[in-house]
Amino acid sequence: MERQNYVPLVRLTMVKEKELPYGGKRINEPELVAELAGQILKDADREYLLVISVDARSKPLAVEIVSIGTVNASLAEPREIFKHSILNNAAGIILIHNHPSGDCEPSEADRRITERIEKGGSLLGIEIFDHVIVGDGYYSFRESGELGV
């Protein structure tokens, strides 16, 4: 008797760990992004990569910690970055990472990953609203003209 092959039926669900206060505002300014991220990143001794999934009006749907790295690097592939936004039916994302040194100036690696994520988002129909680096202040790729060019 021939044995049947089976494939598992799976269902993906997200688990809400906690809620962060943000005042119900649209997250459309880097200061607001840095303020929200500061609740997670304050006193961080390593680089964190966060993604805020947003709706078409820039209202946050959810925040995910995508990667926790070392004191000067955090690694993440586009599939990890976009998984969260796809599950949230997001119109866009905001990338955030911190520089524990306090220097917010982007490295060449920061610029390359931003460009790569922007291209991936374009293929998926998910806009990269901004990439904000936080430290002693912040650096916004959108404000600096390095996004959506």
Image (cartoon, helix red, strand yellow):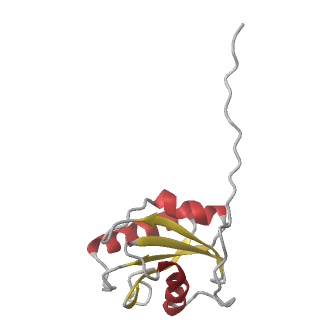
Q: What is the x, y in percent for residue 54?
A: 62, 77
Instruction: Give the mark count.
Output: 0
Specify whether 52 is left or right of 120.
Answer: right
Q: Which image quadrant is residue 133 in?
A: bottom left
Q: Nearer the viewer, residue 43 or 107?
A: 43
Specify whether 43 is left or right of 60.
Answer: left
Farthest residue, direction top: 1
Q: What is the x, y in percent for residue 98?
A: 40, 78
Residue drawn 69% across the image and 11% down it: 2
Q: What is the x, y in percent for residue 88?
A: 66, 66
Residue drawn 62% across the image and 62% down it: 86
Residue drawn 37% across the image and 68% down it: 113
Q: What is the x, y in percent for residue 95?
A: 48, 75
If the image is split into quadrants, where does the N terminus sit? Answer: top right
Q: Nearer the viewer, residue 48 or 42?
A: 42
If the image is split into quadrants, where does the C terminus sit? Answer: bottom left
Q: Which image quadrant is residue 99 in?
A: bottom left
Residue drawn 43% across the image and 90% down it: 143
Specify whether 11 is left or right of 143.
Answer: right
Give the vertical position of 57 relative to 76 (above or below): below
